[in-house]
Image (cartoon, rainbow, N blue to C red):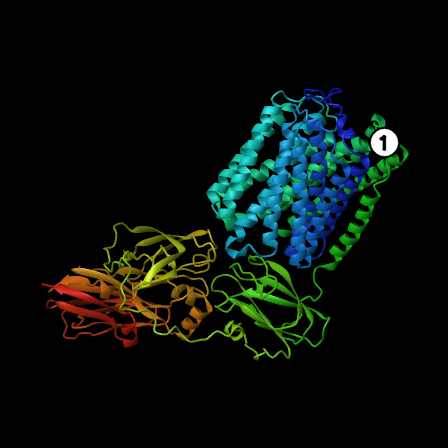
Amino acid sequence: MYSKNDEPAGGAGRPPSRFKASGPRGRHLAAHVLVGVWATLALLSAGAQETLPVARWLAVHLFLLGAATTAIVVWSEHFAVAMLHTPLPDRRWSDARLAGVNAGALGVLAGVWAERPLLTGAGCALLIAAVAAHLVVLVRLGRGALGGRLAPIADYYRAAAAALIPGAALGWLLADGAAGPAHYTGLKLAHVHVTLLGWIGLPVLGTLFMLWPTVLGVRMAERTTVLARRVLVLTGGGLLTAVAGLVAGVRPVAALGIAGYAAGVAVAVRLFARTVRRRPAVSAAAAWTLAAATGWLCAGVLTDLVLLAARPLDAARDGVGALVPVLLLGLVAQVLVGALTYLLPIVLSSGPKERAALRAVLERGWLPRLVVLNLGVALLVLPLPDPAGTAGMLLAAAAGVAFLALVVWVLVRGARSLRRGTDAAGASHRPALWGIAAGAVLTVLAVLVANSGGDTGGGTSAAATAGAGAGTTRTVAVTLADMRIRPARVEVAAGTDLRLRITNTDSQRHDLKVEDGPGTPMLAEGRTRVLHVGRITESREAWCTLPGHRAGGMSMDIVVTGDTGDTGDTGDTGSADAHAGHSATTDSGGPDLSADFSSDWRPRAADLAPAPGGTVHKVELRAAHTTVEVAPGVKQQMWTFGGTAPGPTLHGKVGDVFEVTLVNDDTAMGHGIDFHAGSLAPDRPMRTLQPGERLVYRFRAERAGAWLYHCSTAPMLQHMGNGMYGAVVIDPPGLAKADHTYLLVSSELYLGTPGSTAQVTKMRQNTPDAWAFNGVANQYAERPLKVKAGERARFWVVAAGPSDGIAFHVVGTVFDTVYKEGAYLLQPGGTGGSQVLDLAAAQGGFVETTFPEAGHYAFVDHDMRHAEAGAHGMVEVSE
């Protein structure tokens, strides 16, 4: 029994008597059986031949939702009663909460495995309800309790339960695809952090304040209570800050929160280290195992902090994913092993002699098992070739199986003791038959999970027609790559149970959403997911949900053979329009060019500033979605570099070096960049950057000319058509100075939602709503360029397209200088002149002229369709 001051009674190394007296042994036996079965399930799932992400997800959640959650629910109530000196809650309600937790976990796991969103949702709801009830009980235990120095430990259990509720809700959103691609990364990271560092990490830390000195057999440090409260403020507050930052997608806030959590862990570890004494521990196996677990917690939290502080969220997500083995095996598994090694003999024994005998069983070969387990974790974590990771998993599994075998032996001995005797209070016991029965059922389930593989079809040819009728199960291999879904068409017989084995082989992330059906999360390159579509009774479509990808061709038709909606083979286009019935016609009339611009509109300056001094030019370009006014009174979301369309102009001389830092601030899609002015292998500098990533693109301008740069990410038609282009001007050597130098980038303008089917149809059919200079139709008609009579003007022109070129002409003048694609076609002093600078898409050059007298000189694209639809402006010449 604890004293009023909560100092462990009975001398160093002697366990507090309330560890035994706080509840019936039968319930603890059932809980341990459940923990062991859940852990066995996890090991079987992890060792199964199926390597799909859903199988790995299942193994992780079998351990966390099953083994760890069951143990935490049981022992947090057990320890809270001991720490608070309060009577036990009603056993029936405790058993009901434990049953609710396990039933909810089973529902979640079965729902995700079988692709049954309703079952997944029901399991999450039941789990949240059970944990919420557990939280209520923990709070009520503190009311009127005697409390004492160890009372703050109960706050760790309350905080952990409070953390699991949003963790389960976030998992629900992620499992059924409701998070959406734009918020997937932040919500996934928030779910991982609140679950591992909150639900798992907080009760581990709290329990160690009491368990660590007890296992060592030493007196508790005087400042334990004060430091325990301080650590909870740091870790709990830091976790809350981190999760809020991740949900909002604000990485610095998340990193700040993890820094607070790390500070709390550091305070706790310092206290634990000062508690160590030279005298032998009560259980050396438990002490060393708990110490190793604490070490992995420190390593995991510090690595997590570095990842969030130094990497974009998408890259950090992959890195944090690699930390899961650290926290799952290094922390959670070892804490369970260490705690059970010490506590299980206490719960199951009837006296010191039997306790020592049971502990001796659990400590057999503890040092080799400890070394093997931690070596396995290290091999899983370190950046080594795949065979090392496989070896690490096998080593960790071997150590876990060896311990579980010892646990089974101890449970059998303990069960015999329970049938023979009574506890200290004189209450008789019966075997935990319901726990053993549940364990048997779950063991059968483990065999099914391990051998099912989650797939029955194994890559059936997609081109074949399903000849079987209702009741047939069919699996089709689907590949996401090159902005296409292959196959673009799958034919099945009515009633077929369809599964899609989806693999993303593209450098970009993609997902697949089935119309009125399930969808995958975002899949990185090389990732595979089996999507259970269900019974097919009517034709439907599937597509990638990233903006513009569906319209760009990433769609697939699932066609029921003989369905009246079958319109014939669509080939590899994956046409969304054929299914949805959208019209291919353009918006009638386009923008009203006679309307007024908005009051806050400002034209883009056409003046080209002189090339800056120096030979190295450093520029930062940020890719983002920006709303701009693209025609009089017409505002449109554009995909931009630097917030403008076209992007900032780069200007230099032959031999100059440009160091361009590209940052992808777009939260929904990837972007890259291609500078035509440079000459270098495109593999890495022109690769697609995922949201939050950056790269430095360095090239030397070896040749003069007017060059295009544009987004290098497919589909380039859409990225360029939505504004992701700009110009690089490299002056020819010896270029004379002009009175005025202008840069005009011509382009097509497509109105509508970027990436929508209607907009992309117009791009493919080359039917723009308008044409523009420097991104805005009619802007230089509204705000003319101004020069004086007799002044010489140079017009640099770049045709950005993406499909049309330009025939640049200034009405009322003759060009005496023409420079096109790096060469002079006409220079002053000769007898010839030029009327047009003709450029194909992506070409550039300049022309020069002198305005003879005052007046208004229109400049146009002499393709009159373009001129009349926005590609015109005015030069206002004064005396």
**In the rendering, at what x and y percent does residue 767 appear?**
38, 74
Q: Quadrant of the C terminus?
A: bottom left
Q: Position of residue 282 (x, y in %)?
A: 75, 26
Tell me if residue 186 can be seen: yes
- Place residue 810 in its image quadrant: bottom left
Q: Measured from the top left, where is residue 269 in percent x and y?
A: 60, 29
Residue at label 1? 427
Q: Residues within 10 Å of mark 1 (few under 14, many from 20)?
A: few
Q: Quadrant of residue 141?
A: top right
Most foreground residue, 144 or 255? 144
- Number of labels in the image equals 1
Residue in the image at 83% along x and 41% along y:
432
Q: Is residue 358 left or right of residue 285?
A: right
Quarter placement of the N terminus: top right
Query: Position of 502 compared to 744: left or right?
Result: right
Residue 860, above or below 131: below
Q: Residue at x 69, y 57 (%)?
A: 50
Tell me residue 438's x, y (percent): 80, 47
Q: Secondary structure at mark 1?
A: loop
Q: Residue most toward the front?
A: 144
* 782 or 608, nearer to the observer: 782
767 to the left or right of 608: right
**Does 825 appear above or below 128?**
below
Residue 323 seen in the figure: no
User: Which quarter of the figure has residue 199?
Assistant: top right
Amino acid, disc 1: Ala
Closest to the observer, 151 or 727: 151
